[in-house]
Image (cartoon, rainbow, N blue to C red):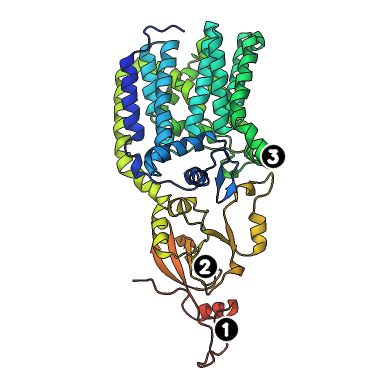
Amino acid sequence: MRGEAGVKKKDIVGLLIFGLVLYMLGNWALPMTDPVESNYVETAKEMMQAGDYLSPRIFGNYWYDKPILFYLQLIAAFQLFGMTDFAARFFPAVFAVIGLIMTYAFATKLYSRRVGLMSAVLLGTSLEYWYLGHAVITDMTLWVTVSATLMSFYAGYESGKARYYYLAFAAAGVAVLDKGPIGLALPGLVILLFLSWQRCLAILLDIHMLGGFALFLGVVSLWYLPMYLLHGSDFLDTFLGVHNVLRATVSEHPRNNVWYYYLLVFLAGFLPWSLVAVPAFFKRLFKRELHLPMGERERFLVIWALAVFIVFECMASKYMTYTFPYMMPLAILMGKYFLAHETMSWRLAKGMGILYLIAMFTILPVVTQDKSGREVARILQQQSQADTAILAYGIRYPVSIAYYSDLRPKRLVPTTADIEKERPHKMSWTATNIMPFAAIEDMDLQRDTILVTDREHIEDLGTKVPGFWQEVGSSSNYVIYRLQPTVPYDGHAEQPGRETGTWRGILEQYLSGNRKMPQAS
């Protein structure tokens, strides 16, 4: 791989500073959000508490949603910085910076230093990359490891040096430890398609490919083998069956399963650059200036991007971050175009950097607070006693409350039969329902009880959920109520036709009077 100018140390230092400022500054002000980030941090916290650094667990149950790598990153950050919001967001930011430097180095080797810098800055100021540089999820680590796999393979393909193939297989092994089989399947498909186009499939028979695959198996067996030996079919059925096979064949969120979903993701994810690149693409298309790439470099980048897009377009479950791995090749291809408009591009990049920093200290703290239970957790800690029952009603289970408070609200459902329907079942999306449950029909109306709900379900208190409820706190997204114990009838006062302390009595009282106690002053 030859460029007009090689990688420069000052460029790497500049990108390092740029990335640390853009992705790490202000992270301490962003609480963990539901429904995704909180699952990861709560799992890491419970692993630390259990002293078990092999088997992910949440709410006291083994949790086979994702492999071990990201949890180990969180645990390492917690041990370094304490269990803080900054610590939770530390490694996503670090990997985002690593990704920028990798993009710069790869684009520089493919084309030139100027293309490398433009590609890295374009990528770093794209909306999706900026978001995932802060998000406590596995995708930034996957992006770096899959990109490292494909970059290393191409370096081996072009130079003929076997060490790059070994590096590619090792990186694929790390990707599988982060996200699962897709860490090998995705780059493997890109490589297979590229070699087919180049008519070089014989490379796959090279002895170093066999050695590289053995290295890959060695890396992944560090976790997958002991997990299977410890947990057997439960691990395979849930991890491979539900979180891989089911996710690919049955849509978890059917509303996203539309053909144009990932086109919208591309437009939004590459903002602001897509606003220029898309019109330019169609302009060339109408002028018939587009043609199949002839050079090896362009073929590899195009296949990389298209393969990622098509694979996830064909999957039943669609998520915004699934196509994220195509951002490396697209950033490099787009970097070549924007280099022809260099002055405008650098001004736009500077403007986006300033906007992101402003948003980091103004908009983002408000948005994350609205999606977090951190404030509610503080109120629950103040209001609850050791024997207080804590319930969550009418809302998606707020794991962040459990994370911040060390309390475990029970998800309230109508009957014990409903609990059985909601509990985890094999090859079903209920496999993710491992939170604690409670049935309305089993509520003890004499017990000190606190209930967390949202404003849409307040009117259910006293009707669908029996009892006298008094508001004791609220946040931007939740309202907290305490059950006021009823006093059974002692025979000294007339209470005609009213059974206090029973389901029937409670409903009668609410139908004839106030449905909620007055708000506490």
Q: What separation in Å lies between label 3 and label 1 (alpha carbons)?
A: 52 Å
Callout 2 secondary element: helix
Please give the name of the residue rendered at 51% of the width and 77% of the height, measured from the top-left corner.
Answer: 510
Give x and y (percent) for residue 343.
29, 19
Please give the name of the residue rendered at 43% of the width and 11% of the height, measured from the top-left corner.
Answer: 109
Q: Amino acid at mark 2?
A: Asp
User: In front: 37, or 76?
Assistant: 76
Q: Earlier in the sequence, mark 3 or mark 1?
A: 3
User: In front: 116, or 137?
Assistant: 137
Disc ID at residue 232: 3
Say above or below: 15 vs 259: above
Q: Where is mark 1, residue-wise? A: 499
Label 3 crowd (10 A; few <14 / some 14-19 / many >=20): few
Callout 3 secondary element: helix
Which picture quadrant has residue 172? top right
Q: Judge left or right: residue 29 versus residue 500.
A: left
Say above or below: 298 vs 94: above
Q: Where is mark 2, residue-wise? A: 460
Q: Earlier in the sequence, mark 2 or mark 3?
A: 3
Q: Earlier in the sequence, mark 2 or mark 1?
A: 2
Q: Amino acid at mark 3?
A: Gly
